[in-house]
Image (cartoon, grey):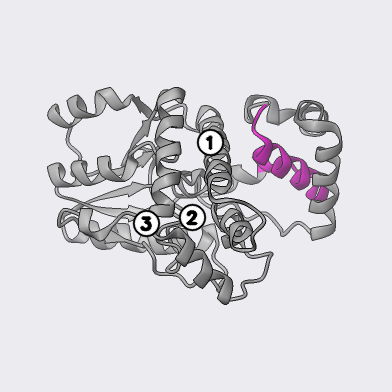
Amino acid sequence: MDFKSKIILISGPTASGKSKFAIRLAKKIDGEIINADSMQIYKQLKVISARPNPKEYNKIKHHLYGFHEVQKNFSTGKWLKLVVKKIKEIKKRKKIPILVGGTGLYFKALIDGLVKIPNIPLRVRTQVRAHHLKIGQNKFYQELLKLDPISKDKIHSADTHRSLRAYEVKLYTQKSIHDWYKNTKSNFKKTDFYKIYISFPRAELIERINLRSKKMIKNGAIKEVKNFIKLNIKKDKSVNKAIGINEITEYLNNKKKMNEIIEKISIKTRQYAKRQSTWARGNMTSWLKLKPSELNNFLKNI
């Protein structure tokens, strides 16, 4: 495989070893790595976000990690603008761009372009979410199909996030989210991408997540959250969704014991990994699926 003209995308559930694999691949093909994880952009969340350690970079250049202040808003649109610029810079240096991360929306924006949907008012979003909470995902999905039949072949029945988004968009704009997508344009051709998804067996992934949760505490997550709390970040900021912040805050407020928060972090991370896998089933069908046991052979055969 000739990767020289390609933009390589690497995704997979959290704790699947994406970052280490990306470094090994970059070493082999003379690449540079770009972050595609929405939490690893934040300067103040090194441990909580499991940001790659510079000591493990192995002389490979990494871009868009830990550059953004947690107090400031960030969006998929801002990420896309920065990434397009980085890709062009890397290609100009005759290197191969390798994007790695678990944020599905980032990859979708890069591949398909960013859809310009009008902002949905908070009252509508709140109303839709309250309705979803009341009736559950199964009934909500059936209602979505009546409201927006196109979603049947586009959104997996278990994909809560996309179901909510499609519902609120159709409800407010009277136009299917999928029709909005038709009007988007990417900065690149579909053939420019070589897409890899690391498909980790569930039982092994759970064990890795449990170990990572313990390691997070050992590596300084408590101190990191203490410093984060001092910044008095508004509750509506997306950075507050980072797994570990609320759990460790409970520990610092003497509401939970250490073993309880480690277990809670593990559970939340497992749930997040499941959502990522659900996203992949619905949105990454064309990606090359590699099991952990197949990664070495893949690198050997390049």
Question: x, y (%) of residue 199?
Answer: 39, 27
Badges 2 and 3: C-beta atoms under 8 Å apart? no
Q: Residue at x 35, y 40 (%)?
A: 10
Question: x, y (%) of residue 228?
Answer: 53, 70
Q: CA distance from mark 2 to mark 3?
A: 21 Å
Q: Is residue 161 magenta?
A: yes
The front one of 63 and 223 is 223
The front one of 217 and 206 is 217
> Crowding near pointer 2: few (<14 within 10 Å), some, many (20+)?
many
Please identify the quadrant where the C terminus is shown: top left
Q: CA distance from mark 3 to mark 1?
A: 20 Å
Q: Residue at x 50, y 43 (%)?
A: 104
Point out the tag, 2 or 1, that comes first from the N-terminus. Answer: 2
The residue labelled by disc 2 is 38
Callout 2 amino acid: Ser
Callout 1 amino acid: Arg
Using the image, determine if residue 113 lies above or below residue 253: above
Badges 2 and 1: C-beta atoms under 8 Å apart? no
Question: x, y (%) of residue 24?
Answer: 19, 42
Callout 3 amino acid: Asn
Point out the tag, 3 or 1, that comes first from the N-terminus. Answer: 3
Q: Nearer the viewer, mark 2 or mark 1?
A: 1
The residue labelled by disc 3 is 219
On the question of residue 295 being in view, the answer is yes
Q: Nearer the viewer, mark 2 or mark 3?
A: 3
What segment carries the magenta color?
A: 158-179
Which mark identifies residue 270?
A: 1
Badges 3 and 1: C-beta atoms under 8 Å apart? no
